[in-house]
Image: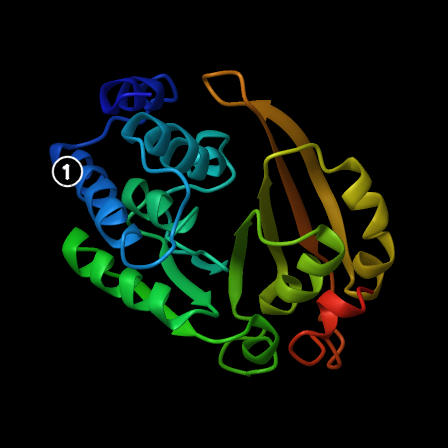
Amino acid sequence: MTPEEFYQALEAFNISLSEQQKEQFETYFRLLVEWNEKINLTAITDKKEVYLKHFYDSVAPVLQGHITNEPIRLLDIGAGAGFPSLPMKIICPEIDVIIIDSLNKRINFLKLLADELGLTGVHFYHGRAEDFGQDKAFRGQFDIVTARAVARMQVLSELTIPFLKVGGRLIALKAAAADQEIADASNALRLLFSQVSLNENYNLPNGDGRNITIVDKKKETPNKYPRKAGTPNKKPL
């Protein structure tokens, strides 16, 4: 997918990028490739592949109408090189984006990236989701939590649901169908008072399959969740 094909694909969803937004995506690509030589950010560095498998893939929740350009608080867990939240932020600048990542080198890249792109309303924190999930400044504070290829739903739910307000939504993006994952996570979702409201497969323009799962938070999360760092992965609910 060339940049021009990316713009045209967005226009099919009535999203027309300004010259500034196009430049932001171009700068994003350039810095991603530059920094990838210093720290491991992505295995994908070909320009057409980045525009398709990182940029277009990341904005799927916007294209599908799950996220709009409103002043909501969005938390991205394990964003790595900023996916999916920062491409969505470029298209929807009203969103307030918070990123938590466990590797400080990636946080340093994201801070520089945000400065270079001229993004405001973006905040970066280094640490484990389990620790921040027990912090009152973060717990129960977000309208949406996004996670792209972070963990299986059985684990991911415990890492993300505690951050949501009651009525908030987890939007999980994955490369494969998630039916079995959701079935395996039924106990975790029950304990966390959450419920799957959407589980949908779709295709990228090149035909590659993708999945989006949305989980709604119904009640306050019990205080004991999330458990200590590392525990959700070792002993899933």
Q: Position of residue 179 (x, y in %)?
A: 78, 36
Tell which of 154 and 168 is nearer to you: 154
User: Is residue 221 found left or right of 139 in the rendered image?
Assistant: right
Colour scheme: rainbow
**Is 232 drawn above or below residue 115 in the view shown?**
below
The residue at the point 64 percent across, 69 percent down is: 162
Q: Secondary structure at mark 1?
A: helix
For image coordinates 14% across by 38% down, the residue present is 23
Q: Is residue 62 above or below residue 79?
A: above
- Classed neighbour count for the residue bearing mark 1: other residues with Cα under 10 Å, few (<14), some (14–19), many (≥20): few
Q: Residue at x 61, y 81 (%)?
A: 134
Q: Position of residue 181 (x, y in %)?
A: 77, 44
Mark 1 lies on residue = 23
Could you tell me how many numbered marks the image carries? 1
**Quadrant of the rendering where the C terminus is positioned:** bottom right
Corner quadrant of residue 174: top right
Residues 214 and 234: in front is 234
* Residue drawn where x is 27% and y is 52% of the image: 37
Q: Give the vertical position of 104 relative to 71 (above or below).
A: below
Tell whether 122 sits left or right of 209.
left
* The N terminus, quarter of image: top left
Residue 160, image x and y in percent?
A: 62, 62
Query: Residue 170 at what x, y percent from top left?
Result: 61, 52
Q: Residue furthest front?
A: 37
Viewed as shown, does residue 114 lie left or right of 226?
A: left
Q: Considering only vertical position in the picture, is 65 above or below 116? A: above
User: Looking at the picture, which amino acid does disc 1 mark?
Assistant: Glu
